[in-house]
Every structure is written in C-alpha cells, then in structure tokens.
Amino acid sequence: MNHKDTKDTKRLDKEEKLKIDFVKKLCVLCIFVVQEKSFITSMKTLFKYFKHHFQDNFNWQLHLVVMLFCFVCLFSNFFINWWEIFDTKWIEGNFEDDIIDGMFRGKPIYFLVFFLFYCFAYFGTSLICILFTKDWEWLYNQEFWIISAIGIAIISFDIGFYWDSEMVKWAVPSQIYYFSARVFDRLISLFTNVLPLFILWKVTQKPKDNFYGLTLKGGTLKPYFAMIALMLPLLIWASYQPSFLRQYPTYRDYGATAFLQVPEWVTVLIYEIGYGSDFISIELFFRGFLVIGMVSIIGKKAILPMAVLYCFVHFGKPFGEALSSFFGGYILGVVSYYTRNIFGGLIVHLGIAWLMEILAFGQVFFKSGVGEQ
C-alpha cells in the first residue's frame, strides 16, 4: 500500500468516526426527548386525534383503493421511461420532469398542463371517494367543484410560474443572478399562492373564520415537536443515502458570498429563510385550504384527495420523498382537521426540511473538514 492509499484510508476512518460520534449525540438527544413527560403527554394527544379518526366511520376499503390509485401513479411516474416514449429533451427519470417540464416549460400551455395533471389527482381521488361512500350530494355540490378548481388553478399557477428567473435577471447584478434566482424562486410563492388564496378566502369564507387555519387556537403545539423527534432517526439514516446527498443541501453559493463580501453563513441564512417561506404557502394550501377550507363543504372526506394531490406535487422529487409525502400529508391532514390550525404542520414541515439541510451540511462538513486535515 503506497503513501496515498494509507492517507486516504486514514481520512476515511476519521470521517467515519466523526459521523458515528455525530449520530450517537443525535440518538442521545432523541432518547432525552422521548423520556420527557411532556413528550408522552404530547403523543397521547396525537393518538387521541387518530383514535377518533379511525373510529368515526373509517372506510378501509376506500383508503386501500385510493392508496392503490396513488401508488400506481407514483410507480408510473418513476419507473416508466417517458423520455424514450416521447423522445423528450430532458432525461430526469420521471413523468413531471421528462414530459411536463421537458415538453412544455416556457410555453403558454405550461400552466394548463399542470392544472390538468393536478385535476386528475384531486378530482380522480374525489370521484373514487364518492363512489365508495355513495355521497351523491358531494357529486352534485357545485360549491365544491368550483372552489376546488379555483384552488387547483392557484397551485398550478404557483408551481408553473417560470417568469421569476427573468424578473431576477432584470433586478440584480449578473454576479449573483443564480443565487438570487434560487432565493426568489422560494419567496415568489407568497405572491403566486398565498396572495390569491387570501383573496379567495375573503370572497368565499365567513368573516369570523380565520385565514385557512392561520390561528394558534386548537390545542398545544408540543405534539408536533414530538413528531419531529420521532422522525430524526429516519432522517439520519436518509442522510447517508446517495440520492439524498444529490438533492440536499438545497443551498448553493454560486459565488454570492465572494461578490457580497460577507461570511457564508449570511448567504446560507438568506437562502434558508427563503427556503422556509415556501413551506408557509405549502401548508396554507394543502392543510389550510384543501382541508380546513373544505371541511364546511365535504367534512373530513377532504383529507384523502389532499393527500394524493400532495403526493403528485412531489413527483419531481426523489422516489422515497414522493412516496412518504402521501403518508406525511395524510397525517398532517388528520391533525389539522382536528385542531383547525396549520401551525403544527408548519412546525413539522419546516423542522424536517431544515433538519435535512442541517444533516446534509453535516455530511459535507465531515467530508471537506476531514479531507483538509
């Protein structure tokens, strides 16, 4: 073994020891949280929500069929070579990237394609629910179809909005264009999603109603921190997967630190604030509008169509993240239904998103830090 091989072996051994020490500390933190009395009380609160949910006319057959519908679409998205069938210019390995983005991005029809794609997910699931529950009033409820179609148009416009890059190019120096474009891409949802939802709420909701669950009423927020603690071991495991490290951290410097002459933690903070703002619009739409806003129209039946649509929105993400989004969306939907607020879901969503960033930064730090020594 030559000197270079020996040096590489020592570097890898040191990297592994640092990672193991890091994981041990996180596991100790998890054990400490789980042993807390408030954690146990919080988990009892969550279990109470789900106990009521599963006891209140829960339809297992309906849920299994909806899951089958969702999973067939999910597998079709990831495991069919759409780029070969349609000879598209993008080869990303899923329907959304290869077909929707590869064939229609930058064209006026781009928004319409997203709208039809999401209508298939939401209304397809709604029709399955109607057939299984025989709730014909739901089928003929014009308010449901009109308001939900407007909502899907809003989320389609938000996701299909591609003019932000041109706006940034006009507004900032070219040296920080790529960094600014990524930050603005996150912040733009406050205008393409939250603002239209606010207008829709003002037009359709009663004055005494809160803005789609933006209220602290409805119980304690402690259960949501408990959910994050339970997710931490899984996130640690995921942070060691190659597919995870290809996606995270989502932060990229693009030379902004050097141009702005600031420490890198400043650009990281700027980006992560923008990154976090995106989750406000996500929670407001899915758990706020599609669950709390639709409860007065279709009751708790609003949860399943929301969960499927939430999964479809993740079709451009890694397979594991898209698959888990159905279950995560469903769980948060149940909780928001019983609490009538979205702050809990926002805490979970932001907590998990920022934890994934932190864990990915940690992996990068171990590799770069050990490599330099």
Image (cartoon, rainbow, N blue to C red):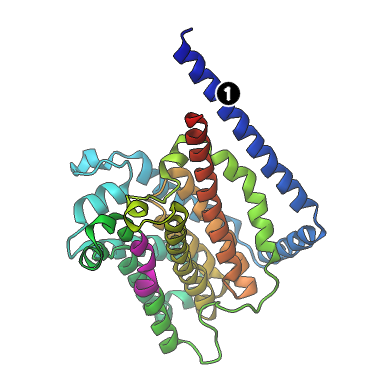
In the rendered view, tell whether residue 129 sits above or below residue 32: below
Q: Residue furthest front?
A: 261
Dot 1 amino acid type: Asp
Whole-percent x and y of residue 14? 58, 26
Q: Quadrant of residue 189?
A: bottom left
Whole-percent x and y of residue 168? 26, 65
Whole-percent x and y of residue 218? 66, 76
Q: Quadrant of residue 113?
A: bottom left
Instruction: Describe residue 249's horizontal placement relative to residue 332 as left or right.
Output: left
Q: Main secondary structure of the magenta part?
A: helix
Mark 1: few, some, or many residues within 10 Å (few <14, many ≥20)? few
Range covered by the magenta-colored residues: 183-193
Q: Residue at x 74, y 65 (%)?
A: 45
* 318 in the magenta segment: no
Whole-percent x and y of residue 373? 51, 29
Q: Residue furthest top?
A: 1
* 189 in the magenta segment: yes
Q: Which residue is mark 1?
A: 13
Counting labels gives 1
Q: Is residue 55 visible?
A: no
Q: Residue at x 33, y 56 (%)?
A: 179
Q: Residue furthest right?
A: 37
Q: Residue at x 64, y 38 (%)?
A: 23
Q: Residue at x 54, y 75 (%)?
A: 292
In the rendered view, tell whether residue 311 sits above or below residue 115: above
Q: Is residue 202 visible?
A: yes
Instruction: Describe residue 220's horizontal placement relative to residue 289 as left or right.
Output: right
The local secondary structure at tag 1 comes to helix
Closer to the camera in the image, 60 or 197: 197
Closer to the camera in the image, 257 or 118: 257
